[in-house]
Amino acid sequence: MNANHQQAAARLQRNIQRLTNRLIRAKAPDFLKQHASLLDDYFREGFATSMVGPRMGIDKNPYAFIALGGYGREEQCVRSDVDLLFLFKKTVPEAAENLIREIVYPLWDIGLDVGYATRSLKECVSLAGQDFEVLTPLLDARFICGMSHLYSELIEHLQKKVLARHSRKIISWLIESNRKRHLRFGDSTYRLEPNLKEGQGGLRDYHTMLWLARVKSQLKQPRDLEYFGLLSHDEFQNLTHALAFIWKVRNRLHILAGRKCDQLHFENQIKLAETLKFKTTNGQQAVEKFLGELQGQMEFIKQQHLMFLYELGYASRGRPRRMPTKRTKLQGLRVNRDMLDFNSLEEIMQNPNLLLDIFQESVHLKIPLSAEAKRLVREFSYLADDALINSADMVRSFERLLLAPAPTFSVLKEMLNTGFLLRFIPEFRAVANRIQYDEYHLYPVDKHLLRTVQTLKNFRAEGDENMDPLCVSLYKELKNRKLLLWAALLHDIGKGGSGEDHSRKGAEMVERILAAKGFKAEEIATVSFLVAKHLFLIKTATRRDIHDEETAIFCAREIKDVQRLKMLYLLTVADSISTGPNAWNDWTASLLRDLFFKVLKILEKGELASREAVEGIARKREIVLGAAASEQARQELAAFFAFLSPRYLLYATADQIREDIARYERLGPREFVWNITRTADPNRRTVKICARDRPGLFSKIAGIFTLNNIDIIDAQIFTWHNQIAVDIFEVNPPPDRIFEDERWARAEEHLHAALAGTLDLSVALKDKLSRQQSAQRPTATRPHRIVVDNTSSNFFTIVEVFTYDFPGLLFTITDALFRCRLDIWVAKISTKADQVVDVFYVRDFDGQKAVATDQITEIKAAIASRLPQKVPSALA
């Protein structure tokens, strides 16, 4: 190996490190090009000092070093690959292998990831025509050193023999490859861990724009996107800004990870926000601001890429669009290449209403705005002054758009992307690209609001088997859908500032927004109520005992009106569905539906609906007694019913009552018996326990499950009047499915030992929990929240714990409550991805509520002392 090249590689390594250090200090604004330039210098020096090159006869068989891919585009990030082509005029000589060893091997030795190809000119052009995977790096080819005329020949041959002959086929392949890539990597603008390069909105979308322009318009450099009229001046400037930010993030990510890395994993997000100097202000964490900025820039690239395809005349799969078949009758607008456009700038100046009319016509004709129309809306939205945006005509036009069935594309989203929605409702600016840093809220606040509107409008699709029939029916019955849709559009508008209660703040903002737009007082009151209470039903369903009639009566008194209840239920469902997959599941849907019907009955029939509950219990009693084998057995069952609590009888079906009584008869002198059954979900098990009640029983069961790596999903606790506990747990099974029965048997032995006092769970779990909690991913810090509520229930103190999920959480909390001499009567476990709200109905060991101030202080301190010190944000 040539010593000169080894020395040059060592010098390159030092220069790259110095340049990277300047980048870390934010003193290398043109890092990508400077990094590529350092590599260029190495290759040029290598070419000049090569001992192999002169022996290959460059005069007879000219050759050149050519940069490909990102290196060819001079987009060389910290850990980017170095892609290189050794191009020969004629055949590749045998000595080329020695040239590779001389030039490339030293780079491998210093840790660079170098990919290379050695090809003749003829072979290169032939392969590019046959395999477009070979062609795309060549589209970014850049001459480094050697015989420059050979590079010129390559570009000329590619243009004449490949691009000119197969342009349509190449474009179709590029667009189809793009589509498949998006399916694989997803939409980075909606990903909790976005891919900066391959996801939709990532750098590869920009690269595809360049490749398409090179094929179709012979683009030479990115600036030609503007010079050739493919992008406006402002669009190119914004694109440059977006790319610079993403490259900055990518470079920092490479430094942080110590390797090439394009997936922005959770463990790096907070560190990057700190590195990039984002600050926590106005109730928004630094990491949320960072992710909001990143999402906004990637959304711009995504939209620019989609517009670029449409402007070139290609649909999503690379087929040219058909000729326009639609016409508009609206003066000032026209259909151009199946897209809506303005007739002229002058007509917009004379009639600014066209800025909204074009969106309404887009819904009517089911065609999108042209890129030029979007540019004009963005640039001239200032013409819509306060008087115009609040005028009766414009408000009515917007409401027609709000009520219209949505086409395959979202017109509201187009209004948001062009900035016109922010002009029409200025309060939207505060929630634009606002991220909530957790695994629960999948979308930025502004996108979530639009998705909620879309979800509600989907409820009008009768006959769609994917739609909940109850939601379809309720939406159809609504007398004034307009108010519900306004509430959906604005329900999280209060998240734009600091403060915990965004619902109350949002309701106050809604009153001002709608008053300015001329709404009647009763309409404002309805929308304001829906916004203020949009979390009321879901919080009650998941955090309160809905089998207690007191809960339904409390809800009915808050809501007061059947029509409002129906709107609030629809808004709650749409909000949950639109938040993300972790917010809505069959369990949540079932709880919410049950609560809705209980509240509806009370509103329709009054608070004496308890008569129906009594009748329902009587029917269950007759079914159970009717199945008795003899008259004596019937009499014994009738007497046993006196031990069953009203709450249990309201919850349990007749079949379940029979099962639980049979389980009780099996109990005999033992401390507990249980049954484990498989559910329809292969990853779930139902554990039904009958046990002699004692203080701390629930805590011990939770601890045993944790000890055996069994995750608790849900729990129902019932206590009969004969001091028998009937507990039902929904759990994930032990991890080792092959030996699952053995694992359950071991768990049963552990529970016997814990109840007998021979197994100290606190000691047994101490090391296990500390190891598992230390392995949790780093998160943003926000204090845990512990609420002790003595007003919502006449009979119980309700303890709410807001924290994040970790192994052993349920045991940790319930053990703390036990040590405060509190008995748990009802438990509500609600896990939203990484967030948890666990709610416990408790009484002290004497059967009283915990109302003393010092007792409440002790409860909060006991729980807080057992919880880890770092918790994620947005535990709302």
Image: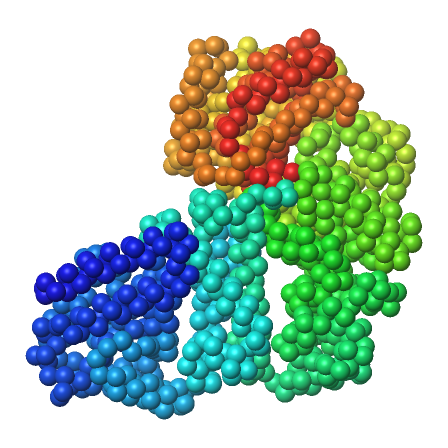
**Is residue 614 depicted above or below 13 in this figure?**
above
Give the image quarter of residue 533: top right
Q: Residue at x 28, y 83 (%)?
A: 151
- Residue extending furthest top? 846
Residue 193 position, x and y percent, is 48, 51
Residue 724 visible somewhere in the drawing: no
**Is residue 734 depicted above or below 316 in this figure?**
above
Q: Residue at x 71, y 29 (%)?
A: 545
What sort of colour scheme is used for the picture? rainbow
Q: Residue at x 71, y 39 (%)?
A: 501
Q: In the drawing, does residue 700 fall left or right of residue 404?
A: left
Q: Residue at x 84, y 54 (%)?
A: 514
Quadrant including the C terminus? top right
Q: In the drawing, does residue 175 fall left or right of residue 587?
A: left
Give the number of marks: 0
Give the image quarter of residue 440: top right
Residue nearest the observer in this picture, 648 or 145:
145
**Is residue 185 depicted above or below 408 in this figure?**
above
Residue nearest the observer in this picture, 450 or 50:
50
Give the image quarter of residue 651: top right
Q: In the drawing, does residue 409 fall left or right of residue 184?
A: right
Residue 38 visible somewhere in the drawing: yes
Quadrant including the N terminus? bottom left
Q: In the drawing, does residue 32 fall left or right of residue 465?
A: left
Residue 867 position, x and y percent, is 53, 26
Residue nearest the observer in this picture, 253 or 164:
253
Residue 354 position, x and y percent, is 78, 75
Residue 179 position, x and y percent, is 49, 69
